[in-house]
Image: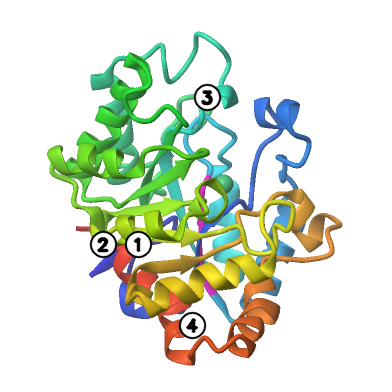
Amino acid sequence: MMIRTVLGDIPHTHFGHTQCHEHLFLEKGKSFEINPALCMEDPEKSSAELADYRDAGGSAIVDAQPVRCGRMEEALVTASSKTGVHIIAVTGFHRMLFYEEGSFPCSWTEQQLTDLFECEVTKGMTLKDGRRITARAGMIKAAIETDGVYADSASEMLFGAVAQAAGRSGAPVLIHTELNADILEMIEFFGSAGISPQRLVICHMDRTRYDMGYHREVLSTGANLCYDSVNRLKYLSHEKEIALISAMIVAGYEEQLLLSLDTTNQRLRAYGADMGLDYILKDFITMLREHGVPMSAVENMTVNNAKQALRLK
Ligand SMILES: [Zn+2]
C-alpha cells in the first residue's frame, strides 16, 4: 500500500508519527486578508519548523492548503527534501470565502473541476501560473459549511467533483467541517458516489460539533475523525479534548482517530509562537498518558491509523 507524497509514492510501512491536518506553508492572499494568522510563506522558517518536528520524532504531515488557495507546491517539495519529513499535499476546495468572488472554483464546471482534481493526483500539481510540476497531491479536500452538502448548487457541484475525482484517482478525501454541519448526510453523499466512509478523514469536529453521541454515530460508519484542535484553548480546553478522545477510545473507535494541530503562524514557533508543530510529540502525548490513555491507543492515533487513512486505493 502506497501513500502519495510530494516526493513520490512511499510504502505505508515507512510512515511513523503523522499529523493529518497541518498548515506548513500558506501564501499571502485572501486568507491573510481575512485573518493575518493565515500566512506562512517563509521557506527558512517553515523548514526550521519541520526540522524541529522531525527531531521530536515526526515522520509525516498533511499540508491542508488546496490548489489555488495559497498552496505553495514547490516550497513543500523543497522542505520535504531538506528535512526528510514526508509531506502529503492536497487538491480540492476550501471554504468559498477564501477565494475571490466569481473566480475559481465556482466559475468552473463540475467536469473541469473533476479533471483538475484527478490530474493533480495522477499527473502533477498545477502552479498559480498554470504550469504543472511533477510533484503530485495525495489527498482531495472538500469543505462542508453549516448548511451541508446540499446548501446550494455550487456546494453540491463541488462535492460531486471531489467524489468523482477520488473515485478515479484512488485518493483519500480530507474534509473541513463548519459548525454543526450534517456529517452523516455527507457520508451518505460520498457513499452513493462509491466513496466508502473509510476513505474519509473528517477534520475539526472536536471544535465544530462537540457532541459525543454524534461522534459515535459518525465513527460507527467507519469514517476517520481527525481531532485537530489540540491546544486551541479558545475552542476547547485540554480537559474537554482529552475527555472526547478517551470516550471514543472506550467506545471502541481508537483505530479511526487521528491527532493534529491545524497550525497557523500563531501556532508555529518559527513564526514567533510559543508552541510548534512538535506540540503533540513533546507535550500532548504525555498529557494523554497522564489521563490514562493507553500507549497502544496513542500509537494507533499518531502512527498506525494514518497509514490506513492516507493510502491510495
Ligand atoms: Zn486547516
2 or 4: tag closer to the N-terminus: 2
Nearer the observer, 128 or 99? 99
Answer few, some or many: residues within 10 Å of disc 2's Cα (few below 14, many 20 plus, some between 14 and 19).
Answer: some
Q: Amino acid at mark 2?
A: Ser
Q: Amino acid at mark 4?
A: Val
Horizontally, is 166 left or right of 178 in the view? left
User: Label 2 near label 1: C-beta < 8 Å?
Assistant: yes
Q: Report the disc number at residue 129.
A: 3
Label 4 – label 1 distance at C-alpha: 19 Å
Residue of label 2? 220
Q: Report the disc number at residue 216.
A: 1
Q: Report the disc number at residue 298.
A: 4
**What span is colored magenta in the figure?**
59-64
Determine the residue positioned at 74% across, 26% down.
33
Q: Is residue 108 above or below residue 245?
A: above
Q: Quadrant of residue 277?
A: bottom right
